[in-house]
């Protein structure tokens, strides 16, 4: 691919991009492409978008070395070997196998497109900013942009479930806050460390036990953690699993 082609944004979509949306694409390096997926949300969602921003744009990275190009092509009723990389990149962007880099919404469509194009250039020119964008969490599970692109949700779930310290403010018997307590959930000896830590956080503030919903009971480890927390509230030393 020539240097001229690398600098040019290609476009696929309706001739009226502001009216109906479309996708911009440019080559970045190797088999990596940046795509801007642009939508008119009023047109796409109708009355459901009333009172919301008219336009939404997302800058994403497509890496054909990572993507399932065959699945993406088949979603268009084609085979991947029958298409060049540019066409495959458009297909993969549409298929949804990409790394989200930046999102913008507003009522000035041209401004959104310009901003996302500028962001693409800046990420290409700044390796540290690019790595930060690829490493940031992009969904509720905490998957990074790079993991999202690979369809790797397991890594995010492993991080979420891994034992780690929880920090809580400490309420002293005189009613003043005396700093933070870090609870190492792996050291509580509890079969349900999250419930234990939650109970401890309430107890060490002097808060009463929560009410269980009708017909249900409080988690035993929440109750046990609460009791340990009350000891601290009443002046006992912090247990071994907690430290300031």
Image (spheres, helix red, strand yellow):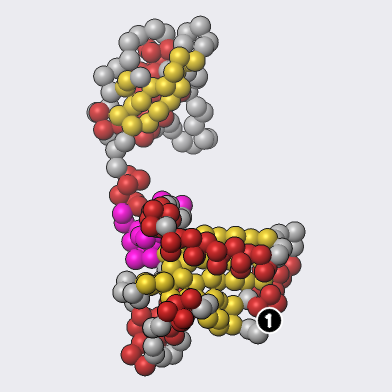
What is the total number of numbered labels drawn onto the structure image? 1
7 vs 183: above or below? below
25 vs 100: above or below? below
Residue at the limit of the structure toward the bottom, as seen here: 82
Q: Residue at x 38, y 22 (%)?
A: 181
- In the shown orientation, is residue 46 left or right of residue 81? right
Q: Camera-side residue: 12 or 96?
A: 12
Quickly name the residue at label 1. Answer: 16
Where is residue 237, by image quadrant?
top left
Quadrant position of the N terminus in the picture: bottom left
Taking the magenta stretch, the answer to whether it contains residue 36 is no
Q: Residue at x 52, y 35 (%)?
A: 214
Q: Residue at x 50, y 27 (%)?
A: 210
Is residue 26 visible in the rendered image? The answer is yes
Question: Within 10 Å of the Cα at label 1, are there few (<14), some (14-19), or many (20+) other Cα atoms?
Answer: few
Residue 173 in percent (x, y) is at 47, 8
Where is residue 31, by image quadrant?
bottom left
Q: Camera-side residue: 35 or 167?
A: 35
118 vs 224: above or below? below
Residue 97 in percent (x, y) is at 41, 71
Residue 63 in percent (x, y) is at 37, 72
Q: Camera-side residue: 111 or 62?
A: 111
* Range of magenta residues: 140-155
Q: Residue at x 31, y 74 (%)?
A: 65
What secondary structure is marked by label 1?
A: loop
- In the shown orientation, is residue 42 left or right of residue 32? right
Quadrant position of the C terminus in the picture: top left
- In the shown orientation, is residue 21 left or right of residue 156? right
Is residue 220 visible in the rendered image? The answer is no
């Amino acid at each position: 691919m020539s240097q001229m082609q690398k600098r040019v944004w290609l476009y696929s979509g309706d001739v009226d991009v502001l009216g109906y949306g479309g996708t911009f694409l440019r080559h970045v390096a190797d088999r990596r492409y940046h795509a801007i997926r642009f939508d008119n949300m009023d047109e796409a969602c109708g009355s459901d978008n009333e009172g919301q921003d008219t336009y939404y744009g997302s800058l994403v990275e497509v890496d054909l070395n990572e993507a399932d190009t065959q699945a993406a092509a088949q979603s268009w009723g084609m085979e991947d070997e029958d298409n060049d990389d540019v066409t495959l990149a458009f297909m993969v962007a549409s298929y949804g196998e990409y790394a989200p880099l930046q999102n913008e919404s507003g009522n000035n469509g041209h401004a959104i497109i310009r901003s996302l194009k500028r962001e693409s250039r800046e990420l290409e020119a700044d390796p540290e900013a690019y790595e930060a964008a690829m490493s940031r969490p992009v969904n509720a599970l905490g998957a990074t942009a790079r993991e999202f692109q690979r369809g790797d949700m397991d890594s995010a779930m492993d991080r979420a479930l891994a034992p780690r310290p929880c920090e809580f403010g400490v309420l002293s018997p005189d009613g003043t806050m005396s700093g933070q307590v870090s609870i190492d959930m792996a050291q509580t000896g509890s079969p349900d460390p999250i419930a234990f830590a939650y109970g401890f956080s309430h107890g060490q503030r002097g808060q009463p036990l929560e009410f269980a919903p009708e017909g249900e009971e409080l988690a035993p480890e929440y109750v046990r953690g609460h009791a340990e927390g009350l000891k601290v509230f009443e002046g006992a030393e912090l247990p071994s699993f907690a430290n300031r």
